[in-house]
Image (cartoon, rainbow, N blue to C red):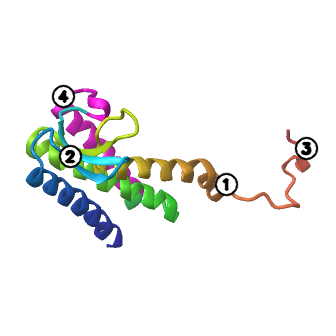
Amino acid sequence: MLYIVIVCALIAADQALKYWTVTHLALGESAPFLPGLMQFTRLHNYGAAWSSLSGKTALLIAVTALLLIAVTVLLMKKIVRHPLGAAGCLLILGGGVGNIIDRIAHGYVVDMFDLLPFDYPVFNLADCFVVAGVILAAVYYLFIHDKKATPKKESGDDSSADGEN
């Protein structure tokens, strides 16, 4: 139940910011946010990251849905139980659902975060959730998963004692 509440809160935050962007900025219009660092710029992304697969909305919806189902299964079957891994999964779910809502409703994703110090694609809160979730999941998998999954060998356990090698 807590997982559902968290994912719903992430989706609500993403959708609220996208709603604000659409109701306060015209397409292509910018507004200051963090002077010298970031501004809000309303863009519509018809593809995935860096506008890849632009115009392939049905494919993006299908691939995203499959990935979201896989992450949901990891949580529901308790394959991922550690809080760090679960947090990563929840962020991926919240961001993925936030963007899939846009793709289904509009055929594009509303982007708004525009980094000023360097040329980087405009992105949205759902994208931030997905990236943070993937980073947390990778840290979990690389540094915690094997330590939790591998049973510790007892000091007196010598499997070669029976003569087998």
The local crowd at label 3, few if under 14, some if 14 to 19, many if 20 or more residues have their Cα within 10 Å, is: few
Q: Give the quarter of the image for residue 106.
A: top left
Q: Which residue bears the numbered disc 4? A: 56
**Tag 1 secondary structure:** loop
**Residue at image mark 2:** 100
Q: Amino acid at mark 1?
A: Thr
Q: Which mark is residue 150?
A: 1
Q: Earlier in the sequence, mark 2 or mark 3?
A: 2
Q: Amino acid at mark 3?
A: Gly
Give the amino acid at mark 2: Ile
Inter-mark Cα distance, 2 to 4: 13 Å
Q: Nearer the viewer, mark 2 or mark 3?
A: 2
Magenta stretch: residue 88 in it? no
Q: Quadrant of the C terminus?
A: top right
| Residue for point 18% across, 28% down | 56
Could you tell me how far apart the alpha carbons at marks 4 and 3 are, in whole angstroms? 61 Å
Report the magenta residues as a range: 48-74
Dot 2 falls on a residue whose secondary structure is: helix
Residue under label 3, please give it: 163
* Mark 3–mark 1 distance (CA, rounded to whole Å): 25 Å
Q: Residue at x 16, y 46 (%)?
A: 102
Q: Pick whichever of labels 1 and 4 is earlier in the sequence.
A: 4
